[in-house]
Image: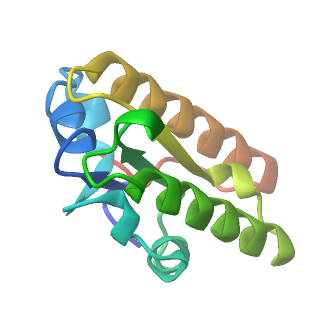
Amino acid sequence: MPKRSIALFCCESSGYPAFEAVTDQALRDAVELVRLPCTGKVEVFHMLKAVERGYTGVLVLGCPLDNCTNLRGSHRAAKRVEAARKSLAAAGMDPGILEMRHVSSLDGYKAAEAIRALMEKTDAVKAAIGVEGRSGG
C-alpha cells in the first residue's frame, strides 16, 4: 500500500506550478506527485494502475482547456480521465475517486481545494466500505 493516498498527475506548465503553490503541508504530504510534460501524456492505464496499487484517489491537474501549452493536451487528458472513470464504474468501483481539474500556474488555491475535496471524497468512500484510516501521511 502506498504511503500517500492520492496519485497526482500534473503537467509541467500549469499543474506542477499550481501544486508547488500549495502551502498546506498535510495536503502536499497526501499526494504522490507524477510530473508530466503534458497531461495529454497520461494514459488510462496509468490512472487505473494507481488505483490497483492502492491509491485511494487519482487527481490529474492540467492546463485550462482554452489555454493548454500543448494545444490539445488537456482535451486528450480529460477524455482519458472519463474513459478511466467508466472503467472504474464497470468494475463496480466509485468513479468519483478519479478527477481532473484544469488550473493555471497561479492557481495554488484551486490545486489545494482539488486535493482536499478528493481526500474528503475518498475518506467517505472508505468509510462506506468499512476501511479505516488514511493511507497518506
Say whether residue 35 is left or right of residue 81: left
On the rendered structure, is 32 left or right of 58?
Answer: left
**Quarter of the rendering containing residue 117:** top right
Q: Residue at 57% x, 67% y: name it.
A: 80
Indicate whether 23 appears above or below 91.
Answer: above
Q: Is residue 80 visible in the rendered structure shown here?
A: yes
Q: In the image, residue 119 lies at what x, y percent?
A: 51, 38
Q: Position of residue 32 (x, y in %)?
A: 28, 57
Q: Is residue 58 above or below residue 42?
A: above
Give the vertical position of 112 relative to 2 (above or below). Answer: above
Query: In which quadrant is the C terminus drawn?
Result: top left
Taking the view exactly as shown, the residue that stands out farthest to the top is 109
Closest to the observer, 136 or 60: 60
Tell me: 110 left or right of 32: right
Can residue 102 be seen from the camera position used here?
no
Residue at 20% across, 28% down: 25
- Left or right: residue 88 compared with residue 17: right
Q: Is residue 15 above or below residue 43?
A: above
Q: Which quarter of the rendering shows the N terminus? A: bottom left
Residue 19: x %, y % from top left: 23, 35
Q: Nearer the viewer, residue 28 or 47?
A: 47
**Residue at (31, 61) in percent of width and height:** 3
Q: Residue at x 19, y 62 (%)?
A: 37
Number of numbered discs visible in the structure rendering? 0
